[in-house]
């Protein structure tokens, strides 16, 4: 799982552009974003761009540069988390356990959520997760991916939020991003329905994989309400404190940011609307994309084009949804 998740970030830079049948106006596919494309404008000392060079870039080039910065930061955060786990194992501590607060690496979230891990509920949550990881039943996702959503999508980059319930509970599926699975893992039915709606809405071709990291790097926070789960036991880590933590994340976005699009699929996600100030943000609701309810209001919701239209009205670069 670790090696698969690490590779997928690099894969974002290697994928060929996919054809589109139709689309709303947005930057060219981020799949082609490369660091070398900006080598001429990124040669200043300390890695800072020359203001003159930056000013001469097109909006597309600036978007690519911003994507690359976010991607590099996400890769760094992932490596730091992986290194913490590896260090424990190297010290002969077996599976080991890294304290939860040490696995949230992204500085912007630590600044946005000051003191959250010092609250009583967080202490109880940490003890529970530690006990679960130390037990004999596998826990998903792997430790270094528990906060993958926050470590990949920095607080200052959040444009949209897609809320899930809890991680996939099968081996190798969960990667810390709601609805997403690593490349090489069969695309779950709910995600396949999301792809079908994307094709109907924007004409996006259906990917052969289920990795949504490209959305996360662009500013789509793929947040599950519960961040861990026991092997083959859905909702086994519900009501242990995770909901209080992720509610704090949603409240913080609502209070400290403006113009974020909250995409709420299904009753569980829609219940989170109470945490969002609708005078400052946008809320899109529909049925859940699962096979049981996709035909009851998810298909045809057009949330992807609506999200981009809302962002563009606010002068915010839209999401490139094509994977």
Image (tube, rainbow, N blue to C red):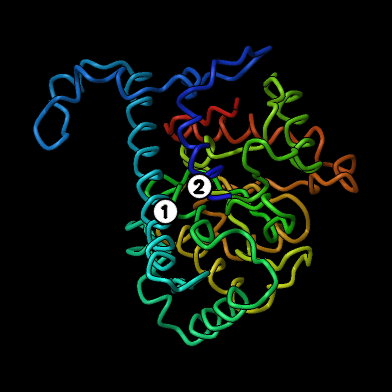
Q: Which residue is mark 1?
A: 257
Residue drawn at the location 57% of the way across and 59% of the way down: 142
> Total number of numbered labels?
2
Which mark is drawn over residue 260? 2
Q: Quadrant of residue 241?
A: bottom right
Question: At which x and y percent is residue 29?
Answer: 50, 20
- Quarter of the view holding residue 49: top left
**Residue 102 percent across, percent down from the top left:** 39, 68
Instruction: Out of 306 and 121, give the one closest to the viewer.
Output: 121
Tell me what residue is drawn at x 74 percent, y 36 percent. Answer: 194
In which quadrant will I find the C terminus? top right
Q: Is residue 283 left or right of residue 64?
A: right
Q: Are marks 1 and 2 in contact (CB under 8 Å)?
A: yes
Residue visible at 41% across and 22% down in the picture? 33
- Compute the Cα span from label 1 to label 2: 7 Å
Of helix, strand and loop, which one carries label 2? loop
Q: Secondary structure at mark 1?
A: loop
| Above or below, comparing residue 93 to residue 74 in the picture | below
Identify the mark at residue 124; answer none if there is no mark. Answer: none
- Judge whether 242 appears above or below 179 on screen: below
Q: Position of residue 303 (x, y in %)?
A: 68, 36
């Amino acid at each position: 799982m670790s090696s698969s998740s690490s590779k997928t970030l690099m894969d974002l830079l290697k994928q060929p552009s996919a054809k589109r049948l139709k689309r709303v106006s947005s930057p060219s596919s981020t799949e082609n974003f490369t660091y070398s494309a900006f080598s001429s404008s990124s040669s200043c000392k300390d890695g800072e761009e020359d203001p003159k060079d930056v000013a001469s870039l097109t909006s597309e080039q600036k978007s690519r540069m911003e994507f690359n910065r976010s991607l590099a930061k996400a890769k760094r955060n992932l490596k730091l988390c992986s290194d913490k786990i590896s260090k424990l194992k190297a010290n002969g501590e077996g599976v080991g356990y890294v304290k939860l607060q040490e696995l949230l690496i992204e500085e912007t979230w630590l600044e946005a959520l000051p003191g959250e891990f010092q609250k009583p509920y967080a202490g109880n949550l940490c003890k529970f997760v530690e006990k679960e990881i130390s037990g004999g039943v596998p826990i998903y996702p792997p430790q270094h991916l528990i906060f993958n959503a926050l470590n990949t999508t920095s607080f200052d980059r959040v444009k949209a939020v897609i809320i899930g319930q809890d991680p996939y509970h099968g081996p190798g599926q969960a990667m810390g991003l709601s609805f997403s699975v690593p490349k090489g893992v069969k695309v779950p039915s709910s995600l396949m329905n999301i792809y079908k709606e994307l094709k109907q809405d924007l004409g996006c071709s259906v990917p052969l994989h289920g990795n949504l990291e490209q959305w996360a790097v662009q500013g789509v926070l793929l947040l599950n309400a519960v961040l861990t789960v026991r092997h083959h036991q859905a909702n086994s880590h519900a009501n242990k404190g995770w909901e209080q933590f992720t509610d704090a994340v949603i409240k913080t976005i609502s209070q400290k940011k403006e113009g974020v699009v909250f995409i709420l699929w299904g009753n569980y996600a829609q219940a989170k609307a109470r945490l969002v100030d609708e005078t400052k943000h946008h809320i899109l609701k529909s049925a859940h994309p699962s096979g049981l309810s996709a035909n009851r209001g998810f298909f045809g919701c057009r949330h992807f084009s609506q999200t981009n239209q809302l962002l563009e009205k606010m002068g915010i670069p839209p999401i490139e949804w094509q994977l």
